[in-house]
Amino acid sequence: MSEPNDDEQTDLGYEEARDQLIEVVKGLEAGGLSLEESLALWERGERLARLCERHLEGARERIEAALATVEGTEDTADTEGPADDSETSG
């Protein structure tokens, strides 16, 4: 099995990286590997875990930005709402 290099791993989407990380964990749990093979697999798992974390952080930032936009829109609507009511009632 050929190991992907760091550039290839960076191109992975979250789901692909997560699935590969699951396989790494299964391989480590199964045992039967030499120390060198186990270390290489562990290092690959660490890289995959960091990649997953970066994807999740990016998603978290996008969600926070979207929520800020929605909250900003609601604040604007709340601010404009009473002004519009006073104009129609007066």
Image (cartoon, grey):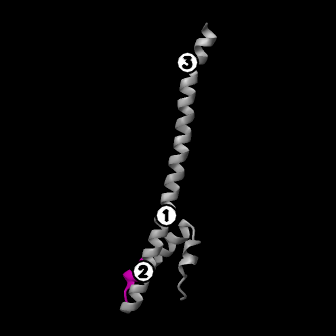
* Chief SS of the magenta region: helix
Q: Which mark is residue 43?
A: 2
Residue drawn at (44%, 77%), measured in percent from left and top? Answer: 45
- Residue 6 shows in this picture: yes
Secondary element under disc 3, as helix, strand or loop, is helix
Amino acid at pointer 3: Pro
Secondary element under disc 1, as helix, strand or loop, is helix
Q: Which residues are magenta?
A: 25-32
The CA span between labels 2 and 3 is 59 Å
The location of residue 40, given as percent across then percent down, is 43, 85
Which residue is the site of mark 3? 82
Secondary element under disc 2, as helix, strand or loop, is helix
- Residue 33 shows in this picture: no
Residue drawn at (42%, 75%), measured in percent from left and top? Answer: 46
Question: Does the segment drawn in magenta span residue 68?
Answer: no
Which residue is the site of mark 1? 54
